[in-house]
Amino acid sequence: MFVALGATALLCGCQTSNQADYMQIGYGPSFDVAHAQCEMQKGSVDQGYIAIGSPGFVAGAGLGDALGNAIAEDQYMNNSLIVSGWKRAPHGKGAAAASAVATGAPPTPYGVARAPGSWINTALLDWSDANKKCGAGDKVSCATRAKLGGQLRAAGFNPS
């Protein structure tokens, strides 16, 4: 029973709400807003339990339920924050990502002007940038525009 109690305390201690543990991966609300939204809804994944038997069995069932709920809530928070444009940073890199966002640097890995998700979103934005520069006479941008245009048309999109 003490092993299960220790595992529960360890698992609950792993849940973090510190922005330094996360990095921005796309567009969405600030970390504080995203975290608050996820935090308000994480209880919806909790499961109840019914246990009949000896006091030790009932206590063990309650502890098991609490442990299962803590795991489900942690998974919910992780997935909910990803949907909001945040993910857990690799160990030791969260603080650098948070300071970059605080200084106005583009979020990793997409950049401020780049939409997360499909390569098509980024290719369309890059094509648009190259098209503007090509119109101003930049020959390298004209080549980039032609290359991206071919890729986009092959994927079924007409960039013009």
Image (cartoon, rainbow, N blue to C red):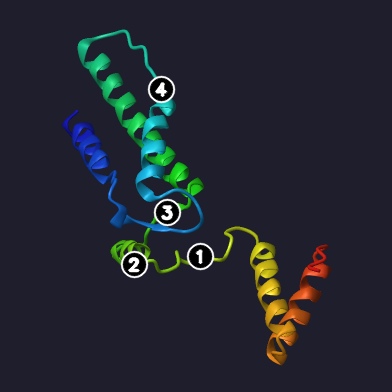
Task: Tell me the kind of residue under disc 4.
Answer: Gln
Give the Cα separation between the discs numbered 4 and 3.
25 Å
Front tag of 4 and 3: 3
Q: Which residue is the site of mark 4?
A: 47
Give the Cα separation between the discs numbered 4 and 2.
41 Å
Element on which disc 4 rests:
loop
Q: Which residue is the site of mark 3?
A: 87
In the displayed structure image, the side of residue 22 where residue 140 appears, left or right: right
Element on which disc 1 rests:
loop
Give the Cα separation between the discs numbered 1 and 4.
40 Å
Q: Earlier in the sequence, mark 2 or mark 1?
A: 2
Mark seen at residue 112: 1
Residue at the image point whose x is 33% and y is 24% from the top? 65
| Residue 15 percent across, percent down from the top left | 29, 43
Q: Earlier in the sequence, mark 1 or mark 4?
A: 4
Residue at the image point whose x is 70% and y is 67% from the top? 124
Q: Which residue is the site of mark 2?
A: 103
In the displayed structure image, the side of residue 154 where residue 66 appears, left or right: left
